[in-house]
Amino acid sequence: MHPSPFHRGPFAQPLSRRQFLWQSGGGLGGIALASLLGQDPAHSASPFSHTQTLHHPAKAKRVVQLFMAGAASHLDLFDFKPDLVKHHGKPSDFGESVEAFQNGLGPWLRPVWDFKPYGKSGKLLSEVVADLGPVADEIAWIHNVVGKTGIHSQGTLLQSTGFNRPSFPSMGSWISYGLGSMNDNLPTFVVLPDHRGLASNGTKNWDAAFLPAQHQGTVIYPGSPTPITDLFPDQRAKFITPTSEAASGDLLAQLNAAHAATHPGDERLDARIRSYELAARLQLAAPDALDISKESPATLENYGIRNDVRTWPKEINAPEEIDAFGRKCLSARRLLERGVRFVQIWSGNDNGFPRRNWDSHEDVVRDHGPLARGFAKGAAALIADLKQRGLLDDTIILWTTEFGRMPSSQGGTGRDHNPYCFTNWLCGGGIKGGTTTGPSDQWGYKPLHRNQPTEVYDIHATILHLLGIDHTQLTLRNNGIDRRLTDVHGHVLSDLLA
């Protein structure tokens, strides 16, 4: 049996919530009592709450994952390659046979925007992400990340779950499972999708899989009339009153308890009870957490949020993207400061043409331009806002995408998929800002040192390390295997640690 407090072995099962509720008599009173006892480490239904002893002292408590769906081009945003400028338009020669996803092995294509140095570190950034310039020295850049596939669905799952196939828990779910909640009135793991829809794989990107279901992400759409679906009764249902809703909840609790008694070993009901409890608390806590009208005009302006996006200067060609991503970032800050543990923010969806994602096969300028301006302004505001509030020191921000794009052109103005090398960046809790590690080669095609790439397992291991968790010991036994976020791989990127 493993000694780690994060390991759930077959011989260390606490009294389940289902058993406790039934032995307490069931009913709404039993649920309320169980909820209250859950705040006491001596009675907690989960042995892996934030009150547990960590493997080592943590430098961070919270994580924000910024996910650019569709594969953002490292070459046009963060990883400047002078040789692409020098050889622009010349036939591409990779020195080896290349398997392209489509037909993107045309001539070399220079960065579609100019680059300038920023901060004391002199980090070169594309003009389209110039808003990141003032916070460049807070960020650690990793330019030699490699993937395992050029397929969007698999690449997205690899970055979000550590596996390139479905049925594995997301990073947010693992962190929720390992550390528990910091605020019982709000979800531990929140997902803010693209305002137009979901990315490749949809809800599988934040699924809890074989972890208890309460650790899956809660989806919120900031700025929409109903940010959280089904949290309140439909306005047309005038017959639903607070009294009738309470009576329904009481009856449901009794039915759940009776059902639980006849289905021993079934954890699904336990998770459903937890979700109902959380929904009841959310009705009070969520409206305040998501009400950005309480923010100052200066804060809203910093995030790029305007009541009328038409008031943006004419030279800003992405007002809708700036406003939408800014709302997600500001909402994330409000959730983080209220105790949400993990927030996942998405840019780009999977709804085809016209492209509203980062999959720029036809035209990098057209597709990347609005999305890049939107994310850069929102992310920069989030970093600066967290820092001035004293929250950046214990909040990790991860920027990622499923893979990069090729240094050669596709159709003259687009780029094909490049799973062989791309960029991630980290900042905040315990990260050494203003650093660049893991260089790519002269074209940005593969890591410069091909036997020393950075893999997603390493990034996940590093984040868990900063949260006080040994990634090899945060496990759950499933189908006879001790599963973990990093599979059987991963090492902490010590060069990035402050």
Image (cartoon, grey):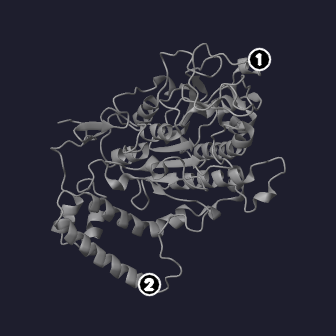
Between label 1 and label 2, give the one nearer the viewer.
1
Q: Which mark is residue 241?
A: 2
Q: Please, what is the three-letter code of the amino acid marked with disc 1?
A: Lys
Mark 1 vs mark 2: which is more N-terminal? 1
- Horizontal and vertical percent for residue 351? 60, 52
- Residue 340 at least partly seen: no
- Residue 346 at least partly seen: yes
Q: Quadrant of residue 54?
A: top left
Q: Secondary structure at mark 2?
A: loop
- Horizontal and vertical percent for residue 446? 57, 21
Q: Which residue is mark 1?
A: 86
- Which residue of the protein is positioned furthest toward the right in this rendering? 314
Residue found at x 54% / y 65%: 288
Q: In the image, is residue 412 above or below residue 35?
A: above
- Horizontal and vertical percent for residue 434? 61, 28
Check whether the beta carbons of the residues at disc 1 and disc 2 lie within 8 A of each other: no
CA gap between label 1 and label 2 equals: 70 Å
Q: Please, what is the three-letter code of the amino acid marked with disc 2?
A: Thr
In the image, 464 versus 295, the foreground residue is 464
